[in-house]
Image: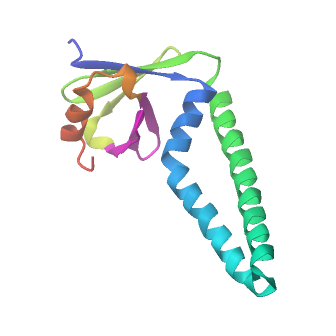
Amino acid sequence: MEPLYEAKFEYTPQNLREIVWSIHKKIALGLMAAVGILFFLLELGRGAAFALVFALAAIVIYLVFYIVLFFHTTSAAYKKRGKIGYINQYKFYEDKLESYSQGSIVSLEYGKLDGIKETEDHFLLLSDSQALPMAKKDCPKELLDFLRNKIKNA
């Protein structure tokens, strides 16, 4: 049987970082703003200039912590995947999708997928145990609509 659609995703540190950042950037930026405002308000009694410097320092410390965690997480995920240029290929059929990666094939029925997390350039198919990333540029335009119709929480 021929697949209805085909797509791929190349596992590189850059691609993983783009996905992680696009999913978490609103949360990270919101937390940085909240931390800065909180420290500004707590230190306001010492003077506005001191409070502002302290708030900016708190934001910088949080940002450094987030960047280190971000690079550590995506690098660790990449190392688990294997060699540079590793490509995961997907084939979409009427009732299931198949994922081809490093010599193995995984078949997954659409009913076992929990949803789709979409960003500007990527989307993730989510299940209980995994997330299947795809770059929109490497997917047929109709694929996302097809998946939204197949996945109950999309």
Q: Residue furthest bottom?
A: 45
Q: Is residue 90 above or below residue 22?
A: above
Q: Quadrant of residue 84?
A: top right
Magenta residue check for 95: no
Q: Going by the image, does 26 lie left or right of 154?
A: right
How many numbered marks appear?
Answer: 0
Rendered location of residue 106, percent (x, y) = 40, 25
Q: Going by the image, does 72 lie left or right of 20?
A: right
Rendered location of residue 72, percent (x, y) = 71, 41
Rendered location of residue 92, percent (x, y) = 27, 23
State the extent of the magenta-drawn residues as a range: 113-134
Could you say which is closer to the camera, residue 122 or residue 73? 122
Residue pictured at 28% horizontal, 21% vertical: 140
Residue pictured at 78% horizontal, 74% vertical: 49
Magenta residue check for 119: yes
Could you say which is closer to the camera, residue 130 or residue 59? 59
Q: Is residue 12 above or below residue 33?
A: above
The colour scheme applied to this rendered structure is rainbow
Q: Is residue 109 above or below residue 92?
A: below
Q: Going by the image, does 116 lie left or right of 37?
A: left
Could you say which is closer to the camera, residue 39 or residue 50? 50
Residue pictured at 53% horizontal, 16% vertical: 102
Rendered location of residue 123, percent (x, y) = 39, 36
Question: In which quadrant of the rendered image does the N terminus lie?
Answer: top left
From the image, give the main secondary structure of the stretch colored magenta. Answer: strand
Residue pictured at 66% horizontal, 69% vertical: 35
